[in-house]
Amino acid sequence: MQTIASRCRIPRLRQLLLVLLATTGLFLAGAAPTSAHAALTGSDPKQGAVVDRAPDQVKLTFSEKVAMSDGSVRVLDPSGKRADTNKTTDLGSNTYGVKLRPGLPDGTFTVAYQVVSADSHPVAGAYTFSIGAPSDTKVALPDQEAGGGLVGALYDAARYLSYAGFILLVGGAAFVLGCWPRGAGVRPVQRLVTGGWVTLTAATLALLLLRAPYTSSGKLGDAFDIGKLGDVLNTKTGAALVSRLLLLAAAALFIAVLFGAYEKREDPKEKKDLTFGLAIGGTVVALGIAATWAMAEHASTGIQAGIAMPVDVLHLLAVAAWLGGLASLLVALFRTTAVDSSAVQRFSTVAFTSVVVLAATGTYQAWRQVGSWSALTGTSYGQLLLVKIGLVVVLVGVASVSRRWTGRIAAEASGLAPEAAAAVVVEQRMKQTAHQASRQTSKKPQKKAAAKPAPKPVTVPASGQGGDDDPERSAQLARQQAAMDSAREKRIRDADPYRSGLRRSVLAEAGIAVVLMGVTTFLTTTEPGRTEEEAAKATSAAAAQRSGPLQLKVPFDTGSADGKGTVQLDLDPGRTGSNTMHLYVKRPNGSAFDVPEVKVSLTNEAKDVGPLPIAPDHIATGHWSANGVQVPMAGTWKIAVTVRTSDIDQITVKKNAQIG
């Protein structure tokens, strides 16, 4: 079977890989900010509450345990000054407190928090409560979300590269040891595995340096703050990253032996013993590196963490064995002629086993992280998981095509290595071409030509063997010989009857794998569907509990002789929907004050709703009431109270209040 190979196939390979990486980068850049992995489910004082006197401390309750340090919670007074003591305490049951300073003024206070959830992701937010009565506030919180901005983008890129480096390092080394031992002496494969180690090491160092600004300030300059780096080392994520660096030092020794002493061993028994030792040592190092992800991210928190972490390690190793081996096979098919059919068959078995392990561990992880059909389709994590499943299905389909090509190669080779079979094909084609040329020559009339003297052979003396030593001529001959060897190797490589088909299918697998890794990176930074639904339920319940009767006291002065007093406004239940409003007008001495008219209006300026007029009915001396007062949405409402004390004297007083 004749196969015509394109002369620019390798450049096209590079261009296609660059396009795939760029597409993945655009996909990463265009993604929305990820959700937090822990949610604020309760607080004391409650959000929007108006308390009579300042509490001793502010308490925050989250949906799961969080990492919190001094300064993680800030309480700011209406002027923007710190109202807390900068000391946080763990009160148990996922509740944390910060003490307040004594002698706080009345007005609206802002509570801002920035913590780290149990699965290593930053969580930030803010809410307000009021002492005495709501007021204007000068507090301006940053618009940037925790883990966002330039630092967030760099951190996500380093996370992606760390996965890619792990896959190339572990999968490439496993491919050499388990499928193709001769690959230890092949330079392109050596560069691939070594490049995976370098990528993983550099990405881990970047993650360690960026961890402090990623979880706190968001300023790139804080990456080089030694004090903050020390704080990171005391966290679970910092310990995991340092452990990974130590294991990578052991991995460097493994690579040195694999591509050094192992490749040079010729005695079969010694090589077998060294293979066994490398397999044991490499497995231990790979398990340890994979565990650094499992111990610090999704698997380490939530239900069944003791089972989830080993399952996550198996999942990562299966991904590395499949996709890393795939990358090694791709390099071997495009850049060498040494890979034989038995190696391809062995990798096909490894890939099939990896897919089975991925299916089992992935199913468990999906159940654990999603938990319900509604979360599978209604949360960001569930939707990304569906995309990942679709990509895996396509990848398995393309892999089945590769398995068919593998079977054809094995049948065609008949026990010969591909380079041997290809060399036979090249020789046959050369004989066929020479035979056709001789037949065409024999058909033409022959003319008798004058005899010419035979040319004298030109002998190029070897360097150091006498004669004129011409370095330029020797270098030119060496370059010509290298070019001839390269051309012959390419002819042999392209003459393999089924190699071209296998290269195309493996290249397609690699392209899909690049996108699949991007989706997987998103999954590790997205709040699990089960957690998102549970947090939403807890937040809704907390919102229902914190909404309560609203009470405001509004002083007024119309400027007349008997024009001073206070209006007390009660709104019950103080939620969205239908409410009952009571108004009590009193003189400065506290006695009931019957004024000619009292009116109220509600305005939500943020939503451009209102003013909604309310005309209460006079019930008794100094008492007005209105039933069925509708509050269409939760938020900050401006309550305007108009009091008329005579035919010409009236005043409108406005106050802000959180309703719902």
Image (cartoon, rainbow, N blue to C red):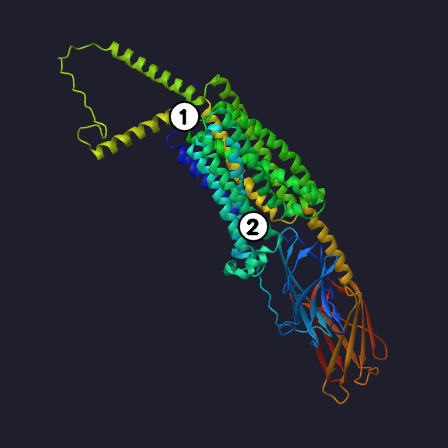
- Mark 2 and mark 1: Cα distance apart in space: 44 Å
Q: Which residue is mark 1?
A: 493
Query: Of helix, strand and loop, which one carries label 2?
Result: helix
Residue 203, how many percent across, how many down? 51, 48
Q: Could you say which is closer to the camera, residue 564 or residue 20?
A: 20
Q: Can the viewer see residue 22 in this picture?
A: no
Residue 453, how many percent across, how many down? 13, 16
Res 262 label: none
Q: Given the image, on which type of amino acid does mark 1 rest? A: Arg
Q: Could you say which is closer to the camera, residue 220 or residue 174?
A: 174
Give the farthest residue toward the bottom. 561
- Asked whether the beta carbons under mark 2 and mark 1 sit within 8 Å of each other, the answer is no
287 left or right, relative to 268: right
Q: Can the viewer see residue 352 in this picture?
A: yes
Mark 2: few, some, or many residues within 10 Å (few <14, many ≥20)? some
Q: Given the image, on which type of amino acid does mark 2 rest? A: Val
Q: Give the quarter of the figure containing the N terminus.
A: top left
Res 242 label: 2
Q: Is residue 391 above or below residue 547?
A: above
Q: Hey, which quadrant is residue 572 in on the image? A: bottom right
Q: Is residue 537 above or below residue 91?
A: above
Q: Earlier in the sequence, mark 2 or mark 1?
A: 2
Residue 449, how many percent across, how many down? 15, 12
338 left or right, relative to 250: left
Q: Hey, which quadrant is residue 229 in on the image? A: bottom right
Report how many numbered discs are placed on residues in the image. 2
